[in-house]
Image: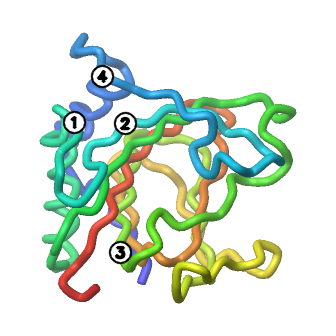
């Protein structure tokens, strides 16, 4: 099941997140932390540096003073899809900047899964941008189940749009394209449900 819902939070809440995390109009010095690669640091064929902020690092334990800004995304998504949330496993945000093509390599970001245990992903887009999310047809069955990337096929491609959330089974391998025109900013919520 892959669900795409637009305007999962109100326009006012969308603007508040953009002001907080991108334009910094609150003058609050929102903390972004440099990441040498926003996907997998060990891929020697590409380097996709960016920035991250961790709202929840481990199950239900807040790691950010700004968690209350992202909770409406989780609450509205679970209510809209009638999902019973057991635990919020982790919530992270990633900010990617356009990079020179010679710097990033020829392929899209390395396909991956966020966690090796069953979970559901609520992936929220803060702003319109290029850099589609790509979900593949391969679902991991256990911790050692890693596909040969040349054998996986694209299942669905989602364009980043302000206020949009994409919901999918987190054991499906996925990735993002590197933005080329403007910043790409997402909030990635990994949830365990009463069904997993």
The residue that mark 3 highlights is 119
Marks 3 and 2, Cα distance to the nearest angstrom?
20 Å
Marks 3 and 1 sit apart, C-alpha to C-alpha, by: 22 Å
- Name the secondary structure under disc 2: strand
Few, some or many C-alpha atoms within 10 Å of disc 3 (few <14, some 14-19, many ≥20)? many
Is the residue marked by circle 1 packed among few (<14), some (14-19), or many (20+) residues within 10 Å? some
Label 4 and label 1: CA atoms lie apart by: 10 Å
Instruction: Name the spot of residue 11 as percent of width and height, x first.
Output: 22, 41
Residue drawn 60% across the image and 44% down it: 130
Which sits earlier in the primary sequence, circle 4 or circle 1?
Answer: 4
Compare marks 4 and 3 and give the one earlier in the sequence.
4
Q: Is residue 8 above or below residue 18?
A: below
Q: In the displayed structure, does residue 49 sit left or right of residue 92?
A: right
Quarter that holds the C terminus: bottom left
The label number, if any, that marks residue 53 in the structure image: 2
In the visual, does 92 lie left or right of 95?
left
Q: Are marks 3 and 1 in contact (CB under 8 Å)?
A: no
**Residue assigned mark 1:** 64
Which quadrant would residue 76 be assigned to in this image? bottom left
Circles 1, 2 touching at the beta carbon (< 8 Å): yes
């Amino acid at each position: 099941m892959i669900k795409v819902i637009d305007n999962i939070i109100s326009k006012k809440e969308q603007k508040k997140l953009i002001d907080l995390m991108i334009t910094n109009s609150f003058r609050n010095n929102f903390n972004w932390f440099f990441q040498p690669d926003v996907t997998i640091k060990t891929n020697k064929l590409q380097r996709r540096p960016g920035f991250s902020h961790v709202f929840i690092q481990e199950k239900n334990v807040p790691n950010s003073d700004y968690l209350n800004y992202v909770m409406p995304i989780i609450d509205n998504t679970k209510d809209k899809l009638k999902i019973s949330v057991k635990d919020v496993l982790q919530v992270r945000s990633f900010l990617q900047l356009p990079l020179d093509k010679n710097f990033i390599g020829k392929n899209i970001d390395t396909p991956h899964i966020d966690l090796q245990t069953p979970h559901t992903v609520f992936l929220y887009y803060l702003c319109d941008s290029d850099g589609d999310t790509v979900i593949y047809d391969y679902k991991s069955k256990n911790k050692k189940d890693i596909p040969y990337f040349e054998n996986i096929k694209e299942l669905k491609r989602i364009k980043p749009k302000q206020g949009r959330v994409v919901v999918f089974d987190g054991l499906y391998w996925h990735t993002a394209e590197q933005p080329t025109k403007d910043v790409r900013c997402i909030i990635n919520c990994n949830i365990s449900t009463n069904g997993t």
